[in-house]
Amino acid sequence: MREVTASRGVDAAPEELSARLEPPTIVEAEGSFTVESVHERDDATVVVAGGPGLQVPLRFEARENGLYYTQEGDGGPFSHLETWLEFEPVDAGSKTRVLMRSTVSLAVPLPFADRIAAWKRSGELERALERIDAEFD
């Protein structure tokens, strides 16, 4: 299992980010999957994300300072996927430092599979932050 992080300053207050960043928006911003369906539950939102030949159910939970999501069940390409999206106010709350941290492990017995998964996940986090930042320019 590998951990990757990415962060970026965004020209918006944490409350504004929180109000506009819905789970499907985050999946689309990462750029690897498209949103196939969204299911609201009492304690979470499950986004079924799809790509070439696969589906990944992602379970999102609201947290005090952001969101947390993980692959739900054993049906996706990962043996482990967890991501924390956290908002930290800066400049007296008028701007936000957005931190994305993810741990990932692929469910395939290949040499260096986790290293490759981390490299790909790192690109997804950077792309998501770039797209989130662009929404507030």
Image: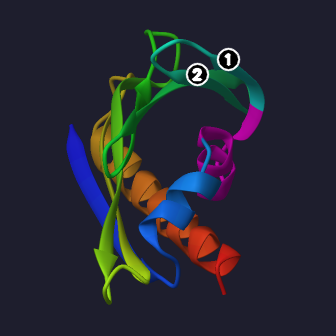
Q: Up-down: is 10 above or below 99?
A: below
How far across and down, in percent of the image, does residue 124 sit?
A: 51, 58
> In the rendered image, which residue does mark 2 sit on?
46
Quadrant of the drawing holding the N terminus: top left
Camera sees residue 112: no
Q: Is residue 50 left or right of residue 62?
A: right
How far across and down, in percent of the image, does residue 37 sit?
A: 76, 23
- The part of the chain drawn in magenta is 23-35
Within the magenta stretch, is there residue 83?
Answer: no
How far across and down, in percent of the image, does residue 119 sit?
A: 38, 58
Which corner quadrant of the image does residue 81 belong to? Answer: top left
Write the residue at 68% across / 74% down. 135
Q: Judge by depth and name the residue closer to the eye, 12 or 38.
A: 12
Quadrant of the drawing holding the C terminus: bottom right
SS state under label 1: strand
Which corner quadrant of the image does residue 45 belong to? Answer: top right
Spatial CA span between label 1 and label 2: 5 Å
Write the residue at 46% across / 54% down. 120
Write the residue at 59% across / 50% down. 26
Q: Earlier in the sequence, mark 1 or mark 2?
A: 1
Residue type (three-letter) at the residue carrying disc 2: Val
Q: Which mark is residue 39?
A: 1
The local crowd at label 1, few if under 14, some if 14 to 19, many if 20 or more residues have their Cα within 10 Å, is few
How far across and down, in percent of the image, does residue 68 sit?
A: 37, 38
Write the residue at 33% across / 23% down. 109
